[in-house]
Image (cartoon, helix red, strand yellow):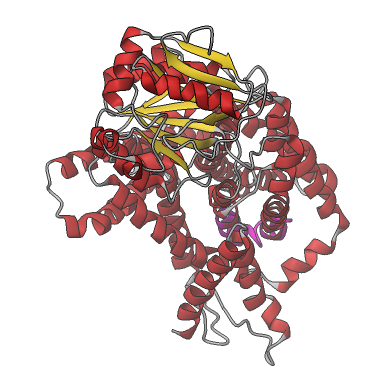
Amino acid sequence: MTALAGIIILGILAQWIAWKLKIPAILPLILTGLLFGPISTFLTEDGSKWIETLYNPVTDSGLFLDKSFFYFVSLAIGIILFEGGLTLKHKEISDVGPTIMKLITVGSLITFIGAGILAHLIMGLSWAISFQFSGLIIVTGPTVISPILRNLSINRKVATVLKWEGILIDPIGALVAVLVFEFIIAGISGEHFTLHAIKEFGKIVIIGTSFGFSAAYFFRYLIKKELVPHYLLNVFTLALVLAVFVISDEMAHESGLLAVVIMGMVLGNLDVPKLKEIVNFKESLSILLISILFITLSANIEVKHLELLKDYRIALLFFAVVFILRPISVFVSTRGSNLTTNEKLFISWIGPRGIVAAGIASLFGLKLIGKIDGAEYITPLVFMVVLGTVLINATTAKLVAKLLGIIQETPKGYLFVGANNASILIGKYLKKNNQDVYFVDSSKEHVTRAKNAGLLAFKMDIFAEELEDIAELGEVGYVMAMTPSAAVNKYTIEKLKHKLKSGHLLRYITSEEVLGDDATIPKEGLFSCSDDYINVSEVVRDYPHIHEVKLKSGEHFNEIISKIYEQISCVPLFIKRSNGDLTIISSKCDDLKIQEGDILVYIGKEAEKQY
């Protein structure tokens, strides 16, 4: 009881430390497991561990019997991957989908073959063990990548590629590792492997995919028909995920991981009521499971296995896999994509391994020890790669992103809430001036119109939790609420003010605020103190053009603004600085600093020459 409670307490403490230090939680979790596992044997009188993962009949201690631990690890990884699948939105990959597919196919193949050859040549391991190792390190860890991305303001393309690769590649890596394991077992038992492998591969893909799709649509049907009460929603989802995993796995060994990832990904892209509640519950559950898993897995390592890491060849293998093989796989997979060289270099640098690699390595390592020479190297080698890549990526990601110029200390992208004639016209101007622009609207027609104008737009309920996900994109620095509804515009500002790091949230002022005095004009008012949605829409209808006028001084700007306010045919938008930066003009622009050479950008009727 003490050990089990201690693991949970230590796990959450490690998660808190990771949050405080802004590092992936896997790092303090693994170190905690090693400290209370193999390292603690040097501190106890009888050489026992403070945390004994597997039952030890000599000391009559331990949390799990051998098989029950294997089952727990498998089910826990399934739940974690399901939660990851829920976060994958197909609209995120409109411009990087082919790149992601190549990374999880071509990139995986390069890593598998390359790491297998390197392990054989450098470590002298048998081909079977070498390729078992390489199959296990194909995966990158979504549980590691997500915290890294959360603490970086990098562009959307790179963040999306890393996020999707990390989640989708996990079941692929698990599948490859299982096939190699089956090959080894078949070789030991003298069975013919080739036909067996083809059959197993086909069964895993077909059963895993079909079960995942079917379960997702079945679950949506239950929720839409309100056949699951609200108080049972989260636990019912958990039970269904476990059922899908187990049934799929029984029909085709190791197809469960693929099934739950597919189920999560399909659900995340369907119109499912209360989905955000499920995501929040699964996220909390995943944090708990990750904490328990990493501590118990690392605590299960023996001192004799850690001593194997003294071999200098292991450091050489690590260097080759991380600093040579990963860049090769990334650059080959992203050839012909719209990623820049610096973006490819950053993706090459960020390749941490996570829970799937560590979990499956522990399972297969234990199963193969004593059956084939070199099997004792599997677990420590994989944990070395996991710990090493996490340590390097967690401590250097921000520095490398800065050096490569893909980090934005102050994000400058624009998120428009409401895709109407005015916002689309302004969005096109911003895009023409090399700004990143995003649109969200609940109307399919409006979204289509924005897309036809060459803009990136998403159909989304403004009141949905997904709006927060879009606003958290590394590139979004400004939110402009421009819908015809004053309530929606106010709601948008209130909802996102704690999510947006820059704090630049602006909205149309209301008709009541227009008619009031200066005291009623809100600080988040957009453009002018005399134009609400109706006024701006009428200006755009009559004069759908954006103009620029060069400013001589602050007095010149105030003179023009005063004349604009006297008319009903112009609306001020931005101040374009000499370096190309744009400053949004708000309803209260008293503190706006103007320098000679700045440009006033306005919409509507072209100003007279004396302006």
Query: Residue shown at 52%/47% (left/top)?
Result: 501
Query: In the rendered structure, which segment of residues is drawn in magenta?
Result: 359-379
Left or right: where does residue 278 sit relative to residue 556?
A: left
| Front position in the image: 14 or 455 | 455
Q: Quadrant of residue 33?
A: bottom right
| Front position in the image: 479 or 349 | 479
Residue sitting at the far right: 312
| Front position in the image: 577 or 312 | 577
Q: Position of residue 81 (x, y in %)?
A: 45, 48
Q: Position of residue 224 (x, y in %)?
A: 16, 40
Q: Position of residue 105 (x, y in %)?
A: 58, 29
Quarter of the image where the N terminus is located: bottom left
Asked whether the viewer can see residue 446, the reply is yes
- Where 575 sits versus 609, above or below? below
Q: Position of residue 525 (x, y in %)?
A: 38, 37
Q: How many marks?
A: 0
Q: Tell whether position 27 is magenta.
A: no
Left or right: where does residue 349 sit relative to residue 465?
A: right
Asked whether the viewer can see residue 198, the reply is no
Query: Residue shown at 55%/21% (left/top)?
Result: 600
| Front position in the image: 155 or 128 | 155
Query: Residue shown at 73%/33% (left/top)?
Result: 345
